[in-house]
Every structure is written in structure tokens, then in C-alpha cells.
Amino acid sequence: MEYVAVLLPSIVVGLLFWFAMKSIFNADKAERQAEAQAQAEAESRIAAPTDRPDPETKR
């Protein structure tokens, strides 16, 4: 029982640290995915031709 009393605080702190780091990494992963999606949408808007006709070719 003495070993449990000695090791339990370290185990609890280790688990708290693990959960905190896991949530930080998951948030970073989600942010990177959102940034990549926004970048892809911006690039597709730039690359897509406009729906408006060119005034010089329509004479």
C-alpha cells in the first residue's frame, strides 16, 4: 500500500499532462486542417474563371 501512496501523485500528474498535450495536439491538427481547407478554397476561387463575359470579346 505504501507504493501506491508514493506513485499515485506522479501517475495522476502524468495523466493530466498527457490529456493536456493530447488536447493541444488535436486542436493544432484541427487548425491546420481548417487552414488548408481555407487555402484550397481561396486558390480554387482564384483559378476558377468568372461567370461574367469579357466585355472586349462581346462586340
Image: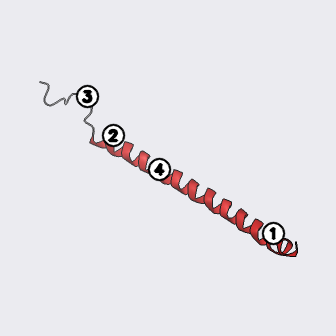
Separation of marks 3 and 1 at Cα, in angstroms: 69 Å
| In the image, residue 32 above or below residue 58 | below
Q: Are marks 2 and 4 in contact (CB under 8 Å)?
A: no
| In the image, residue 40 above or below residue 51 | below
Residue position for label 1:
8
Q: Of the residues under marks 2 and 1, which one precedes in the sequence?
A: 1
Q: Of the residues under marks 2 and 4, which one precedes in the sequence?
A: 4
Q: Are marks 2 and 1 in contact (CB under 8 Å)?
A: no
Residue position for label 4:
33
Mark nearest the camera among 2 and 4 is 4
Q: Secondary structure at mark 1?
A: helix
Q: Secondary structure at mark 4?
A: helix
Quadrant of the frame with the N terminus:
bottom right
Separation of marks 2 and 1 at Cα, in angstroms: 55 Å
Quadrant of the frame with the C terminus:
top left
Q: Who's the residue at 47% across and 50% down the image?
A: 33
Mark nearest the camera among 2 and 1 is 1
Q: Who's the residue at 13% across and 29% down the image?
A: 57
Mark nearest the camera among 3 and 1 is 1
Going by the numbered disc 2, the residue's amino acid type is Arg
Q: Secondary structure at mark 2?
A: helix
Residue position for label 2:
45
Q: Of the residues under marks 3 and 1, which one precedes in the sequence?
A: 1
| In the image, residue 57 above or below residue 25 | above
Q: Of the residues under marks 1 and 4, which one precedes in the sequence?
A: 1
Mark nearest the camera among 1 and 4 is 1
Residue 10's image quarter? Answer: bottom right
Residue 50 spot, x, y in % from top left: 27, 33
Q: Who's the residue at 79% across and 73% down the image?
A: 7
Residue 11's image quarter? Answer: bottom right
In the visual, does 10 lie left or right of 19?
A: right
